[in-house]
């Protein structure tokens, strides 16, 4: 998940008010609105927010920016307002075991968060699908993956490299993450991965991601989060992924990309937005999945996030429609 970018919050709220001025042209320059009379079938990137998560975010207490829990009832209400039928709910369990865990034994907290997410999602089985999560560097990683897979409560696995302290330039880290990907492949659990970790993230790390990690899971869909892998825009990483897909490299056979928060993070630069549109076309629209991300810490709700995406990314109306209709293999 992207770190909050406070300076962009006000900008994004202003931009959404511009959607009333609709334009009928097929192609639109960045910063112009397009007709939004269709919405995504699925939000491929959402999160709930338990009371345990809230305790992490609100310690020390924050006023007035207190973050309340987000339940499945809350998420369904947001999806209904956006007229989005279904969503993928990614567990926040990895938050409880980062580089500096607050508990000397974080595994019970990780298990509890995964279980809470599964229980919440089970209230809406026709609309929500849960993905479990954990720190892939932890000693318990393979055990928690086995537990989640055997529970049949989860449709996949979510990994967040930055929050877990994964460094793609560290061979030991790469080997541990590769082992998790191999095991997930054996269980048939798709993976959504925030690929940017700690340390450098560019050409070299993106190649490691493809050649050593994604290659270890040839039978399951792997979804790169936030198009280039998360947080600040990485044109180098995006270039590696897009060119690998264009060359039909075997590691990319069932590789997908969600566009969660790309306009929120990079939308203030028309030049970057043009590059992003070019890379989306190079990757191919069929691999691009719409996602919003969690509506917490000032981030946008699904409806406003879709509007901002269509406002800022210079794609055509037909291209937006194609992305809106995409459904990941694990949701079919």
Image: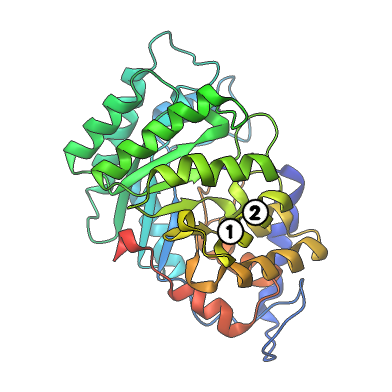
Comparing 230 with 200, the one in front is: 200
Whether residue 20 sits left or right of residue 172 in the image: it is right
Which of the 4 quarters of the picture holds residue 86? bottom left
For image coordinates 62% across by 66% down, the residue present is 309
Whether residue 157 sits left or right of residue 278 in the image: it is left
For image coordinates 59% across by 28% down, the residue present is 167
Colour logic: rainbow
- Give the quadrant of the N terminus: top right
SS under mark 1: helix
Q: Residue furthest top?
A: 104
For residue 231, above or below residue 268: above
Comparing 48 with 64, the one in front is: 48
Which of the 4 quarters of the picture holds residue 297? top right
| Label 1 to label 2: alpha-carbon separation | 6 Å
Which disc number belongs to residue 240? 2
Q: Position of residue 23 (x, y in %)?
A: 70, 87
Circles 1 and 2: CB atoms closer than 8 Å: yes
Residue 235 seen: yes
Whether residue 242 sits left or right of residue 314 in the image: it is left
For image coordinates 40% across by 53% down, the residue present is 75
For image coordinates 72% across by 65% down, the residue present is 15
Q: Position of residue 118 (x, y in %)?
A: 26, 41
Which disc number belongs to residue 331? none
Number of residues whose C-alpha sits closer than 10 Å to that of mark 2, classed few (under 14), some (14–19) or many (20 or more): some
For residue 234, above or below residue 134: below
Which of the 4 quarters of the picture holds residue 19? bottom right
Q: Mark 1 points at which residue?
A: 244
């Amino acid at each position: 998940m992207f770190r909050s970018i406070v300076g962009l919050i006000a900008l994004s709220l202003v931009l959404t008010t511009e959607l009333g001025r609709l334009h009928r042209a097929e192609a639109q320059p960045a910063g112009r609105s397009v007709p939004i009379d269709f919405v995504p079938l699925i939000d491929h990137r959402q999160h709930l927010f338990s009371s345990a998560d809230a305790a992490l975010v609100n310690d020390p207490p924050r006023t007035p920016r207190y973050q309340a829990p987000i339940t499945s009832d809350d998420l369904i209400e947001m999806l209904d307002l956006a007229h989005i039928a279904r969503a993928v709910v990614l567990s926040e369990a990895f938050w409880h075991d980062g580089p500096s865990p607050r508990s000397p034994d974080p595994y019970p907290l990780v298990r509890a968060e995964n279980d809470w997410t599964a229980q919440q999602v089970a209230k809406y089985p026709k609309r929500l699908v849960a993905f479990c999560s954990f720190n892939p560097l932890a000693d318990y990683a393979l055990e928690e993956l086995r537990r989640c897979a055997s529970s049949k409560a989860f449709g996949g696995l979510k990994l967040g490299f930055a929050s877990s302290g994964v460094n793609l330039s560290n061979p030991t880290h790469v080997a541990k993450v590769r082992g998790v990907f191999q095991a997930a492949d054996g269980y048939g659990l798709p993976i959504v991965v925030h690929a940017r970790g700690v340390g450098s993230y560019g050409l070299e790390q993106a190649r490691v991601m493809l050649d050593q990690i994604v290659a270890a899971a040839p039978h399951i869909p792997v979804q790169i989060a936030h198009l280039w892998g998360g947080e600040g825009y990485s044109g180098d990483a995006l270039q590696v992924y897009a060119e690998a897909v264009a060359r039909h490299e075997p590691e990319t056979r069932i590789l997908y990309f969600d566009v969660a928060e790309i306009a929120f993070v990079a939308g203030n630069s028309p030049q970057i937005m043009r590059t992003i549109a070019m890379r989306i076309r190079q990757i191919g629209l069929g691999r691009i999945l719409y996602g919003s991300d969690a509506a917490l810490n000032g981030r946008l709700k699904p409806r406003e996030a879709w509007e901002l995406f269509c406002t800022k990314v210079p794609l055509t109306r037909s291209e937006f429609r194609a992305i809106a209709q995409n459904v990941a293999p694990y949701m079919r």
